[in-house]
Image (tube, rainbow, N blue to C red):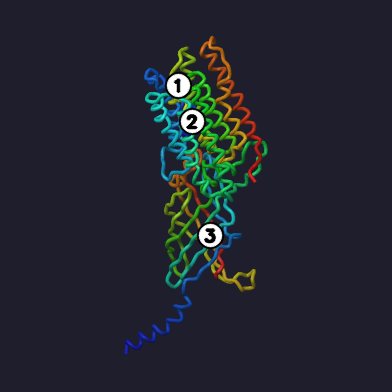
Amino acid sequence: MQEFLTNPVVQGGIAPFVVAVIVVAILAKAKLAGLAVTVGFAIAVALVSGLGFTPLTATRKVVLLGLLAPLVGIVVDFALKKSRTLTAVIALCCGALTVWVFWSVLEQKAIGDALLLGGVAAVFVAWFVAATLQLAGQPVRAGGAALMLGLGAGISAILGASALLGLYGIAVGAGAGAFLLVQMLTGRKLVAGATLTLSASLAAGLVAAAALVLAQLPWYALIVLGLIPLAASLPVSDRLPIWAQAVIVSAYGFAVAVIAFVLTWWAPPPI
Amino acid sequence: MSKKLAACLVAAALPLSASAAPESYVIDPYHTIPYWETDHLGFTTMRGRFDKPTGKFTIDTAAKTGTLEIVIETKTLSTGDSERDARSRTRDEHLRTPDFFNVTEFPTMTYKATSVKFVGDNPDALEGDLTLLGVTKPVSLKLLRWRCGPDPRTQGKRYQCGGNATGTFKRSDFGMKFGIGPIGDEVTLWMSFYGFRQ
């Protein structure tokens, strides 16, 4: 059993996915199926590195915010009126939190380098969150986008030298995959909301940003990953069955993610 | 009479005490190399090293005390795998990420010895604290070799001490938990070192 649980495929993929499917089945009626993403993420963190927060390193801050994100998502879904202003405020907060996450690294750099690195990471995460939140009312697109956000960030992180961050990202994708699969199998749309879109975009966005700051994800791959939410917004006929819509939306996102993979693979070593 | 004798003995001992005062040494970064090793997949032992550490130590053979402070730049880590070839990244690049040594966030690791145990006139073991990934835990080092004397490379103008030390710790105690199981938790540290007397 121990050997099974230390297998990276189980840690980042199978275990998060299986548990996320159960979560979707249990919480779908309560309109909280989007929690599957965070549960999948939490399972991977527990199996890969354990749920510890002392000392509060940048990676642990990523985990902390990834676990807290759905709480904000639930408040947004059930207590607040959705608006562009609200989306902008949430995105700006996420950008500011990104600076906090990587502060221990930024403060060691020269001011110009710190501004550039922190700025790129913060703008990327803010954009990732804002663009994905736009899909909150479209559960198939939201699920497809979240699937590819997680897989895109995760596989890019692995290619950028960090398997740990990679498994965290893939787990986000596994949770979103469970959310999408249940819709494909039942032919019924679930409620995504900010519970899913904020959780997936913040966790995956911070994983990708961490791969930039702490590992070797090139900045231009980050920009490409930022296009995934836009790809998930490309036209798909509503007349198609849900499973077909899900496949097409995911394929759009995958096509973009593959570009990020190729760019990361061929990125030159750091000087 | 006995008081006079005691006073004479104390007076006679004073110059000796002065000559046995703590001596300070600066670590030679070119001949001080910390190595580490851990189990890999249950098949073999993976070894790596860090380059050019800095630090200092003091030793007082009369009082049988000493201190050591050594600073290691984690980005100097090397396991001999630095060429990517057909892979996206090398093992050394992987070891520098948050999966293991997290060198961007924690560019140094330090060892500070707080006490030195002597056997006879020679130091035999160090008790101290290792700080790695922002976590400080006690780690003991056993001295396998220790010798002081004139440096033959300088025709005896420079005085040096050198030796080998080893100790073990669990990397999980420092929060380095990725891959435990396939990759060993217990890490053995080996260090060959030189110090030049100041």
Which residue, as the protein is rendered here, is positioned at the far right? B85
Residue A81 visible somewhere in the drawing: yes
Q: Residue at the spot x=59%, y=21% of the render?
A: A252
CB within 8 Å, label 3 to label 1: no
The local crowd at label 2, few if under 14, some if 14 to 19, many if 20 or more residues have their Cα within 10 Å, is some
User: From the image, which quarter does the N terminus of chain A lie in?
Assistant: top left
Q: Residue at the spot x=44%, y=69% of the render?
A: B120
- At which x and y percent is residue A55? 43, 45
Q: Write down the quadrant of residue A46 in the picture.
A: top left
Q: Look at label 2 and name its amino acid.
A: Ala
On screen, residue B147 versus residue B87, left or right, reads: left
Q: Nearer the viewer, mark 1 or mark 2?
A: 2
Q: Write down the quadrant of residue B1 in the picture.
A: bottom left
- At which x and y percent is residue A178? 47, 22
> How many labels were placed on the picture?
3
Chain letter of disc 3 in the image = B
State the SS at label 1.
loop
Give the spatial CA distance, label 1 vs label 2.
Answer: 19 Å
- Please, is residue B36 above or below residue A27 in the view? below
On screen, residue B152 versus residue A97, left or right, reads: right
CB within 8 Å, label 2 to label 3: no
On screen, residue A16 versus residue B35, left or right, reads: left
CB within 8 Å, label 1 to label 2: no
Q: Nearer the viewer, mark 2 or mark 3?
A: 2
Q: Residue at the spot x=55%, y=22% of the render?
A: A232
The residue under label 2 is A88
